[in-house]
């Protein structure tokens, strides 16, 4: 029996039991049978959650691009690796075969080398969802450069912060991007960011919108002529199992974004295994994940996981609403998509529109539907199941995180019976635990607590770039000897998990992870603002939206509140990006604080969510009178 591809519920339970009892043996067999190695490991796993230090497949050598590309060339050179579906449906889709992908990645890798990029150097990629994005990611991996993809919706200052944090040497960008009917001046954003960066030596610019941009002599170069001149042969760099593959930033509840570091071998094994099982990918299937490669979902389940399985993966440049709300379903019909993976926020937005948009298209190719990024509510789950899957395609509600690298809790379709709003069971190799506030594990079923993982898995992040101490504090200090996820969860009577949401100051808005502290820092930059507190409140489409309580320096009439609201959101857009804009801004004279000066967000959350029947214990407040005041002014 192969453990790699699980096909039934009984098989799942058998494999799961084995993976817990003999984790090293379990992962070793998978690594052995399904990948190409230049040198095998000396040791499958060494770990210490105290330090923390986690190493998988130590001593092994490999290159992930040989696993994602080269090895498929023998048998599958003509198979489509990537389907590129452009923003504008009138523009032709592009089919890139494994053979062509190999040449394009190699040429790009040679360009990087010619520009002085070496193994271990960090390269920032700030591109829209065009083929160059996937190709540049793979080109970095080919030569052992560490890619740091920054989602091309982030602002110049967010980009600069990320470039500086990991001292990137190069930025790869484009002249601009399409987003529905709009274009965005990406190169302008990069130029602005680079005013605050000192480590960037060169900028490569892909042409996408053919806009008239300025190129800085000695720094900026058009990408295409360099690619045209480059050789399409490039020997892959030999990488150690634990060499960093990439950095990807994610928001924390405080301070700077965290540059999560993923390493080579474990990440490859983990994403390949989970892709195969969660989507039940078969040889001729067309798989589509609607995420952007700027997020972990795109790294693991558009690029690495699918390509490591020799799959056909679709990259979509556009948005669900352009030219109309039928766009997703049009693409499904056009490319006969078999597995479709999207976010609850997209499902909720589409469910609000006329059903004709769905019914117009032939969706009979669909076999598996996926959801990721936040809890999927019951209504959205049913809409997805009834109208997209026609009750025939199982929904995999996949719970995981940037930090976990790959899917952790998810049904295996056609094996695990699904249950709306439940991510169901841990995948093989994943050992969840629910913890109470005193740090004890809660055993048994029908319980809820804080979700931890008690044993390492191959695709987990190994550190935070430049700040191992923060890695330790954030993930390994709340509960002894366990990885703490930051989420709350409950376990039902049969052992299914339902993720209930963040228990820290991270808010998930439209599936994007936003820390409150960086937003508050941005708001406080406004000259009229004295202090602020941001909380989340339930929102029909976004899941959560942001509510800001703002104390002004002067409460005088002088300034118009409406203007101030616009200005505050403008500052947020500049510092972080439009995704972090506040839906509601309430001006207030004070914030409820404990005697130690900590803002009591629990109360602010309740007021923002219009749930004020029971505010809980307010006896420890320094200024209880302010609560009444805030309730009166609530929006
Ligand atoms: C947080 C991680 C993993 C890729 C996208 C987000 C929430 C994610 C689910 C789900 C309930 C979910 C959690 C998690 N989350 N998937 N299926 N059900 N919640 O990655 O930005 O690192 O965010 O997203 O709160 O901790 P991320």
Image (cartoon, grey):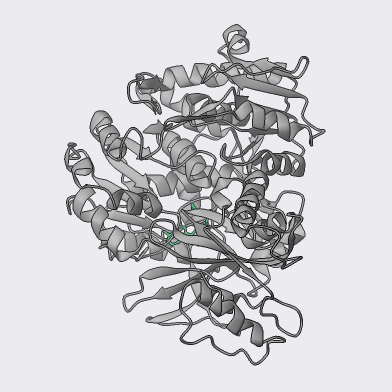
* Percent coordinates x, y for residue 86 in the rendering: 40, 26
* Percent coordinates x, y for residue 219 in the rendering: 76, 19
In-image side of 513 versus 318 (left or right): right
In-image side of 344 versus 37 (left or right): left
Q: In this view, does 555 lie above or below 524?
A: below
In-image side of 440 versus 316 (left or right): right
Q: Is residue 561 above or below residue 245?
A: below
Q: Is residue 207 above or below residue 440?
A: above
**Viewer-side residue, 625 vs 279:** 625
The residue lying furthest to the front in this view is: 557
**Viewer-side residue, 112 vs 335:** 335
**Viewer-side residue, 508 vs 69:** 508
Quarter where residue 577 is shown: top right
- Residue 418 appears anywhere in the view: yes
**Viewer-side residue, 358 vs 25:** 358
Could you tell me how many numbered marks the image carries?
Answer: 0
The residue lying furthest to the top in this view is: 229
Q: In this view, does 438 lie above or below 346?
A: below
* Percent coordinates x, y for residue 179 in the rendering: 46, 33
Q: For the point 34% across and 19% down, which residue is it?
A: 92
Q: For the point 46% across and 82% down, which residue is it?
A: 443
Q: For the point 69% across and 64% down, which residue is it?
A: 557
* Percent coordinates x, y for residue 606 in the rendering: 51, 77
In-image side of 329 versus 208 (left or right): left
- Residue 43 appears anywhere in the view: no
Quarter where residue 158 is shown: top right
Quarter where residue 417 is shown: bottom left
The residue lying furthest to the bottom in this view is: 619
């Amino acid at each position: 029996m192969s453990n790699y591809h699980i096909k039934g519920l009984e098989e799942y339970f058998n494999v799961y039991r084995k993976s817990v009892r003999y984790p090293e043996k379990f992962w070793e067999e998978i690594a052995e049978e399904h990948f190409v190695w230049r040198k095998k490991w000396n040791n499958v796993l060494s770990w210490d959650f105290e330090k923390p230090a986690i190493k998988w497949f130590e001593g092994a050598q490999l290159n992930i691009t040989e696993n994602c590309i080269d090895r498929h060339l023998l048998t599958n050179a003509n198979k489509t690796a990537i389907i590129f579906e452009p923003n504008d449906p009138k523009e032709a889709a592009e089919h890139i075969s494994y053979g062509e992908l190999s040449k394009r990645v190699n040429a790009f890798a040679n360009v990087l080398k010619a520009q002085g990029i070496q193994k271990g150097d960090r390269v920032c990629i700030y591109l829209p969802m065009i083929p160059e994005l996937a190709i540049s990611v793979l080109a970095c991996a080919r030569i052992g450069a560490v890619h740091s993809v920054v989602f091309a919706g982030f602002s110049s200052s967010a980009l600069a912060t990320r470039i500086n944090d990991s001292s990137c040497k190069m930025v790869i960008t484009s002249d601009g991007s399409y987003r529905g009917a709009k274009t965005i001046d990406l190169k302008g954003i990069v130029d602005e960011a680079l005013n605050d960066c000192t480590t960037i030596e060169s900028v490569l610019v892909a042409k996408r919108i053919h806009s008239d941009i300025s190129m800085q002599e000695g720094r900026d170069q058009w990408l295409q002529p360099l690619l045209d001149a480059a050789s399409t042969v490039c020997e892959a760099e030999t990488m150690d199992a634990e060499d960093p593959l990439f950095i990807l930033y994610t928001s924390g509840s405080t301070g700077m974004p965290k540059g999560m570091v993923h390493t080579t071998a474990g990440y490859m094994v983990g994403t390949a295994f989970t892709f195969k099982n969660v989507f039940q990918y078969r040889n001729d299937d067309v798989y589509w994940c609607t995420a952007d490669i700027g997020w972990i979902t795109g790294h693991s389940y558009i690029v690495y996981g699918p390509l490591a399985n020799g799959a056909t993966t679709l990259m979509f440049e556009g948005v669900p609403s352009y030219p109309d709300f039928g766009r997703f379903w049009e693409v499904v019909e056009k490319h006969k998509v078999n597995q479709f993976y999207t976010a609850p926020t997209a499902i909720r937005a589409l469910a609000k529109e006329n059903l004709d948009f769905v019914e117009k298209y032939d969706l009979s190719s669909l076999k598996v539907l996926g959801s990721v990024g936040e809890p999927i509510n019951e209504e959205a789950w049913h809409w997805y199941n009834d109208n997209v899957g026609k009750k025939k395609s199982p929904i995999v509600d996949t719970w995981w995180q940037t930090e976990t690298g790959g899917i952790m809790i998810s049904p295996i379709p056609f094996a695990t019976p699904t249950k709306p709003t439940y991510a169901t069971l841990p995948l093989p190799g994943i050992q969840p635990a629910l913890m109470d506030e005193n740090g004890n594990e809660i055993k048994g079923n029908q319980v809820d607590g804080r979700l931890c993982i008690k044993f390492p898995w191959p695709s987990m992040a190994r550190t935070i770039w430049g700040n191992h101490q923060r890695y330790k504090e954030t993930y390994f200090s709340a509960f002894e000897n366990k990885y703490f996820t930051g989420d709350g969860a409950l376990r039902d009577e049969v052992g299914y998990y339902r993720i209930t949401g963040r228990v820290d100051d991270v808010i998930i808005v439209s599936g994007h992870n936003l820390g409150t502290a960086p937003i508050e820092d941005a708001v406080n930059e406004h000259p009229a603002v004295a202090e602020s507190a941001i909380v989340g409140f339930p929102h029909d489409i976004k899941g959560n939206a942001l509510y800001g309580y703002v104390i002004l320096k002067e409460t005088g009439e002088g300034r118009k509140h409406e203007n101030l609201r616009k200005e505050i959101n403008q500052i947020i857009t500049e510092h972080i990006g439009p995704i972090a804009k506040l839906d509601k801004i309430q001006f207030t004279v004070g914030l409820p604080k404990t005697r130690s000066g900590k803002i009591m967000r629990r109360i602010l959350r309740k007021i923002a969510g219009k749930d004020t029947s029971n505010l809980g214990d307010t006896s420890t407040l320094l200024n209880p009178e302010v609560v009444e005041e805030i309730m009166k002014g609530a929006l």
